[in-house]
Image (cartoon, coloured by chain):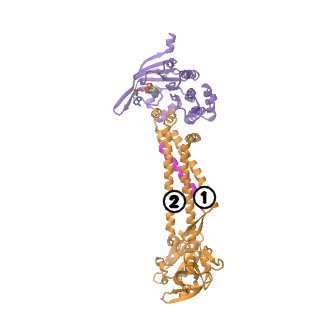
Chain colours: A orange, B purple
């Protein structure tokens, strides 16, 4: 075996330029794939992290039909205290649930006493909201960052609204809302802080205390529009969703209680389809890599066999078994694949490392200055490397087979 | 027991509808440790005959027995094994493996065909390098050697796995006359030293005169067997 690889290696170095070109192609292909996976992977993880950790939570529970008409934030589809308690009990039973936060959501008018515009407001319990979406407090770009998220009589507004309405932290504003029965009520608030906007649903919402929200809407009961849930391990999402759906469906009597529905963040965010798109592109770019390796290695091996027909005839005549001739050429393909993979992996890891040392800043949607921290798992690298080596071997199979099948007399006569 | 026995041996090449009879009923016998030449004009069938004796090609009819083996019965794999064990080859164009040194070319059959243990291999390769006078050039690659040096290495490679006979189709056609003569001398000395049968083809009359037994071919027939030693002794 070593003999075969040794001879294969000498033959590869005999056509140095051609071998280097092929290796270069493999390296470029590998770097492209690994870098793409690392960059998009970290981008995806970052975006998903932002969505789940600063807006949506991992899971949300609503009354049935709420999500379908979420654009209007319908007050008549809120959950009543009984339903909320039932969700609370169900969540209590699930270990993977870290915490959860009830929200009252509504659309309102926002006035600075000279101008008026619309705003979407979340009434939240500051402590529970901060625990459920821990990145939210960090999104404050002006005003208080620490302490409670929002106190009674205070409001947190998105930066776009603050700029548009020319208001600043400490200003007093009025929020006017129509309640379920159609009557209008207003309440003054002091701007506590201003958040940066992020892309996706809820990325441009304002926040007030949940008690203020209920007060403003003149709710008689402690109604809740949505319950956002944080898991201790996001990988458990599928399982927990199933368990929770089961729990909430099982005990329900559709006559007496409103039916509840459970959605994952992916079902609520348009970014999920972008994430799917990225996954699809990853598959596509892998296909391109496979094609590059297949075509370039096959090309080199076909050439190698063609140029060495007389040599093959010679070694066949002196008794080299066809199986060993096969392995001589397979060895060349294997070596190309292994060397290309090793170089490709080394270059890719170096580039990924460099991107972490000298980070790339970029903007996405409303967000400025996101920092990319590409990362790739050992398993991913091993998978790609194995694939490249396998494809290189596959690509040399046909030429190697042809070499092994050559008739020595015909081969020796070849000019 | 004779080494090679051919009786009514024929070879017909077929290309579509056209049949080319290359060997037309040849009968001959080659004894062990002899030094044999097949001579004849171009196209007379020398290569065809050597290819069959070397188990590279099958006869169309008649029988050809090499070392008690009916070579018509050998399939591809068995023929390769048979050649590896018993037959050495020397080619007109030397045909050394270009990426291997002189030493490695001689070693090749022991590594890739026979798989001898390393120590035994080394001893045998050194013995042959010395026998053909190439010990000083052991590390040279074929492109750093002269034609005569390459053919010396080829002679050593043909003998290294203790072949019973060595077939050489026009081994001197690409060499100048002096070198050609020295290669034939080397081959005969190797025959003396190792007892290996050498069978070569040529159309050079001076080279042919070095053979001890000469078969003359013409148009696919073996016309005569000329035992030069008998002639010389007569
Ligand atoms: N593969 C083949 N197909 C068809 N005809 C062939 C083939 N090989 C040889 N022949 C024919 O068989 C005859 C004998 O050819 P062969 O090569 O044995 O002659 P040779 O004595 O070796 O000639 P040379 O001295 O030129 O090498 C020639 O007529 C040749 O054209
Ligand atoms: Mg010939």
* Residue A158 horizontal/vertical position (percent): 57, 77
Count every numbered label the image shows and give the total.
2
Instruction: Classify mark 1 as within 8 Å of ligand 1 or not, answering yes or no.
Output: no
Q: Nearer the viewer, mark 2 or mark 1?
A: 1
Is A225 a magenta residue? Answer: no
Determine contact: label 2, label 1, CB under 8 Å.
no
Specify the quadrant of the image occupied by residue A137. bottom right
For the N terminus of chain A, the image quarter is top right
Image quadrant, ligand 1: top left
Residue position for label 2? A282
Could you tell me how far apart the alpha carbons at marks 2 and 1 are, in whole angstroms? 17 Å
Q: Secondary structure at mark 2?
A: helix
Is A382 a magenta residue? Answer: yes
Q: Which residues are magenta?
A: A374-399
Front-most of residues B221 and A193: A193
Q: Is residue B28 above or below residue A166?
A: above
Give left or right: position of A362 versus B40.
right
Q: Is residue A289 above or below residue A60?
A: above
Mark 2 neighbour density, 10 Å: few (under 14) some (14–19) many (20 or more) = some
Mark 2 and mark 1, same subunit? yes
Q: Secondary structure at mark 1?
A: helix
Residue position for label 1? A352
Q: Is residue B86 visible?
A: yes
The subunit letter for the residue under badge 1 reads: A
**Residue at the extreme left:** B17
Specify the quadrant of the image occupied by residue A379. bottom right
Front-most of residues A222 and A352: A352
Q: Is residue A122 above or below residue A383?
A: below
Mark 1 neighbour density, 10 Å: few (under 14) some (14–19) many (20 or more) = many
């Amino acid at each position: 075996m070593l003999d075969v690889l040794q001879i294969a290696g000498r033959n590869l170095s005999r056509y140095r330029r051609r071998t280097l070109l092929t290796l270069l192609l493999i390296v470029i292909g590998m770097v492209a794939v690994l870098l793409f996976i690392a960059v998009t992977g970290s981008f995806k993880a970052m975006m998903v992290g932002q969505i789940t950790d600063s807006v949506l939570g991992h899971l949300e529970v609503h009354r049935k039909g709420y999500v379908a008409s979420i654009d209007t934030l319908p007050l008549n589809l809120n959950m009543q205290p009984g339903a909320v308690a039932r969700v609370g009990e169900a969540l209590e039973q699930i270990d993977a649930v870290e915490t959860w936060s009830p929200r009252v959501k509504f659309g309102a008018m926002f006035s600075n006493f000279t101008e008026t515009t619309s705003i979407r407001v979340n009434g939240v319990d500051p402590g529970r909201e901060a625990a459920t979406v821990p990145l939210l407090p960090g999104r404050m770009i002006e005003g208080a960052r620490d302490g409670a998220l929002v106190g009674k009589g205070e409001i947190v507004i998105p930066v776009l609204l603050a700029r548009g309405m020319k208001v600043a932290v400490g200003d007093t504003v009025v929020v006017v809302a129509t309640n379920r029965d159609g009557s209008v009520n207003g309440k003054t608030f002091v701007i506590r802080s201003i958040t940066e906007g992020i892309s996706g649903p809820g990325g441009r919402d304002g926040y007030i205390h949940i008690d203020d929200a209920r007060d403003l809407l003149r709710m008689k009961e402690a109604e809740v529009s949505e319950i956002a849930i944080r898991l201790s391990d996001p990988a458990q999402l599928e399982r927990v969703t199933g368990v929770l759906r089961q729990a909430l469906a099982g005990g329900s009597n559709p006559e007496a209680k409103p039916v509840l529905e459970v959605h994952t963040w992916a079902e609520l965010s348009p970014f999920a389809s972008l994430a799917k798109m990225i996954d699809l592109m990853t598959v596509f770019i892998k296909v391109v890599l496979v094609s590059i390796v297949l075509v370039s290695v096959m090309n080199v091996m076909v050439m190698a066999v063609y140029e060495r027909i007389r040599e093959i005839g010679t070694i066949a005549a002196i008794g080299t078994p066809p199986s060993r001739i096969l392995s001589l050429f397979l060895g060349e393909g294997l070596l190309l694949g292994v060397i290309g993979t090793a170089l490709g992996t080394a270059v890719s890891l170096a580039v990924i490392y460099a991107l972490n040392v000298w980070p790339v800043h970029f903007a996405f949607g409303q967000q400025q200055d996101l920092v990319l921290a590409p990362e790739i798992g050992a398993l991913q690298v091993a998978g790609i490397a194995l694939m490249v080596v396998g494809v290189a071997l596959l690509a040399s199979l046909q030429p190697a087979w042809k070499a092994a099948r050559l008739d020595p007399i015909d081969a020796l006569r070849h000019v | 027991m004779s080494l090679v026995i051919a009786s009514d041996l024929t070879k017909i090449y077929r290309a579509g509808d056209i049949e080319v009879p290359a060997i037309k009923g040849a009968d001959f016998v080659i004894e062990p440790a002899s030094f044999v030449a097949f001579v004849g004009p171009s196209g007379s069938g020398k290569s065809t005959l050597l290819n069959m004796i070397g188990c590279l090609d099958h006869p169309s009819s008649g029988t050809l027995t090499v070392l008690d083996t009916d070579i018509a019965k050998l399939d591809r794999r068995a023929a390769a094994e048979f050649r590896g064990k018993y037959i050495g080859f020397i080619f007109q164009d030397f045909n050394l493996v270009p990426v291997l040194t002189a030493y490695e070319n001689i070693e090749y059959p022991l590594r890739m065909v026979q798989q001898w243990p390393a120590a035994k291999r080394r001893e045998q390769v050194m013995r042959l390098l010395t026998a053909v006078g190439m010990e000083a050039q052991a590390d040279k690659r074929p492109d750093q050697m002269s034609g005569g040096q390459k053919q010396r290495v080829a002679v050593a490679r043909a003998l290294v796995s203790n072949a019973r006979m060595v077939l050489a189709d026009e081994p001197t056609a690409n060499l100048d006359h002096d070198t050609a003569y020295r290669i034939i001398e080397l081959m005969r000395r190797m025959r003396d030293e190792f007892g290996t049968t050498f069978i070569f083809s040529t159309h050079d009359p001076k080279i042919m005169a070095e053979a001890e037994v000469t078969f003359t071919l013409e148009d696919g027939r073996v016309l005569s067997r000329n035992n030069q030693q008998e002639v010389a002794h007569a």
